Image: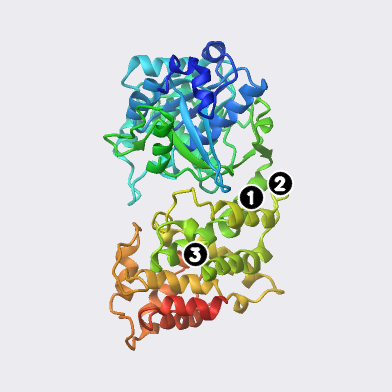
Amino acid sequence: MKLSHAELQNKEMWEGKGYHLPEYDRDAVAAATKENPFWIHFGAGNIFRAFQANVVQNMLNAGTLDRGLVVAEGFDYEIIEKMYRPHDDYTLLVTLKADGNIEKTIVGSIMESCILDSEDDKEFSRLREIFEKDSLQMATFTITEKGYSLVNGKGELLPAVEADFSTGPAKPASYIGKVVSLLYTRFKAGAKPIAMVSMDNCSHNGDKLYAAVNTFAEEWNKNELVEADFVAYINDKNKVSFPWTMIDKITPRPDASVEEILKNDGVEDLEPVITSKNTYVAPFVNAEECEYLVIEDAFPNGRPELEKGGLMFTERETVDKVEKMKVCTCLNPLHTTLAVYGCLLGYDKISEEMKDEQLRKMVEVIGYEEGLPVVVNPGILDPKQFIDTVLNVRIPNPFMPDTPQRIATDTSQKLAIRFGETIKAYHAFAELDVADLKLIPLVFAGWLRYLMAVDDNGNAFELSPDPLLDTVCPHVAGIKLGEDNDVEAALKPVLSDKAIFGVDLYEMGLAERVCGYFRELTAGVGAVRETLKKYVN
C-alpha cells in the first residue's frame, strides 16, 4: 500500500484497513481547478494539510464544492519536491481523538502543488497564470508570523528584501516580494479583486500581511518600478482585502507511534524527510480533532460557502474578541501554566499533567475563576464552553504527543499577552480587585523558578529556547535551593519590567506576592510540589 493515485484505485484494500478515501472524481476536479482555480494557499506545512485541505475534502465529498486547492511553498521547496509530488499531492491525515479512536483519511483535495521560485521560469509562470485568472477569489497563508517580517531582530532590512526594493517585481528573491510580484501580475491583468488571507496564529494577522505587501508596493512605486495605481489597488478594500482570522488546531510534528500504526496497516514509504532547511515532513500528519477558524468576511471577489465546511465568518471586531478570548484566557495561559510547571515536575507530555491533581486544579482556577470574569464574549464562540473543551477534551488527549518543553519556548514573549491583559482588566474595573488574583502570580513565580534550570528533584534540565534567557537568567543565577536568598533584590528588575509582564508588578501590587511564592518554591528539593499543594488545593 503506497500513497499514490495509482495505488489508491484499489479502494477495497484501503477501505478494508479503515481508511476514508476521497468520494469524488479527482481527475475531473483537478481539471476544473487547473482551469478555474479559486483558492491558492501559501505554506505547505502540517496545519494546512490537516485543516484547510481536509475542510475542502469534506466539501468535495458532500458536493458543495466542485474544485480543490492549489498550494505553493516559498520557504522550503523540498517539501513539494520530496513529499507532495512523489505522493501525487495526497496526504494521509491521522486524527487522534481524545476517546482513543483514530480516524485515518486520505486527503486528495490538493489538486496542484507549486514552488514559489522566481528563478524557475516554469514554476513562476504557472503562478502568474493562476493570479491572472478571474476565478481566483483568495490567497491564504500559513507561513508563521516571522514570514511577514521584512526586517531582522535588530530592525534592519533583510538583505533579500533590500535587494528586491531596488530590482522590482520581475524576479524578487524574498517571500513577500514574490507574493507582491504575483499581486502585481493580477493588477496588470485588469486590477482583478482578491482576498489576501493570513491564517497564521498571530494577533491581527491580516494587518501584518497588509503592512508587508503595502511596504513593497510603496517602495517599488518610489523607485519607479510600478505605477502609483498599483499602490492604490493594494489599498482599495473593494479590490484587495486583508481579513483578520483566528485559527486554532494542534498539529504536532509527525509522531513515530502514528507511523508505526500506519506501517502495521501495510502502508509503505512513510519515512519522514528532514530537508536541507531542517523541515521535518512526512507523508502523514497527525492532529487533534478540535479545530476553529474564524474569518473576517471581506472577500471582494466573492467566496464559496465555506461555512458549510465548518469555518466561521463574521466581522473584524468579533474576530478580535475571539482572538483575545483564546490567547488571553481560554487556552494559551493554561498551556503556559502547564508548560512551566510541567518542566519543573519532570513531565514530558502535556496530557499527563492533566492527571496531576494540583496542576489540573491550577489551570481550572486560572481559566474559570481568574480569567473568565474579564473575557468579552464574542458571541460566535462561548468562552466557558471553549475552556470546557480545552480542559476536558483537548489538553487531556493522551494521543496528542505535545510536550511542556515545546510549549515553554519563548515564554518571556508570551506572559504579557497571556496574563498581563487579565491583570490590566482587573485593575481597570472597579468591581474587580487585582489582589484577588492568587494563581496567576504563582505562574510568574513558577517561571522565575523554571529559569534556574533545576527541577523539583534538584536535577538540572535544559531550558527551552527564549530570546530573553541571557537577560533574565542572570537574575536567578545566584539563588540556590534551600538557602537564605535575597529574593527581592534579585527579582526586582524583572518584576518591574512591563515588556515581560505587560505591567509593572510593583505598580499592580503583585510583586510582593510573586516574591513570597518564589521563596517557597526555592525552599529546597520538593518545594515546588509542596507550594502547589498549599496554594492550589
Of 272 and 16, which appears nearest the observer? 16
Of 35 and 508, which appears nearest the observer? 35
Q: Amino acid at mark 3?
A: Thr
As drawn, is 401 to the left or to the right of 469? right
Image point (57%, 42%), residue name: 289
Q: Amino acid at mark 2?
A: Ile
Q: Secondary structure at mark 2?
A: loop
* Residue assigned mark 1: 322
Picture coordinates of residue 98, whole percent (x, y): 56, 48
Q: Secondary structure at mark 1?
A: helix
As drawn, is 453 to the left or to the right of 375? left
Of 135 and 449, which appears nearest the observer? 449
* Snapshot quadrant of residue 271: top left
* Residue assigned mark 2: 380
Query: Which quadrant, please, contains the N terminus?
Result: top left
Q: Nearer the viewer, mark 2 or mark 3?
A: 3
Mark 1, Cα crowd under 10 Å, few <14 / some 14-19 / many 20+, is many
As drawn, is 356 to the left or to the right of 466? right
Q: How is the image coloured?
A: rainbow
Q: How far, Cα to Cα, is label 2 from label 3?
A: 26 Å
Marks 1 and 2: CB-CB under 8 Å? yes
Q: How far, Cα to Cα, is label 1 from label 2?
A: 8 Å
Picture coordinates of residue 286, whole percent (x, y): 47, 39
* Snapshot quadrant of residue 349: bottom left
Image point (59%, 60%), residue name: 329
The answer to whether one can see residue 66 in this image is: yes
Mark 2, Cα crowd under 10 Å, few <14 / some 14-19 / many 20+, is some
As drawn, is 187 to the left or to the right of 277? right
Picture coordinates of residue 39, whole percent (x, y): 55, 24
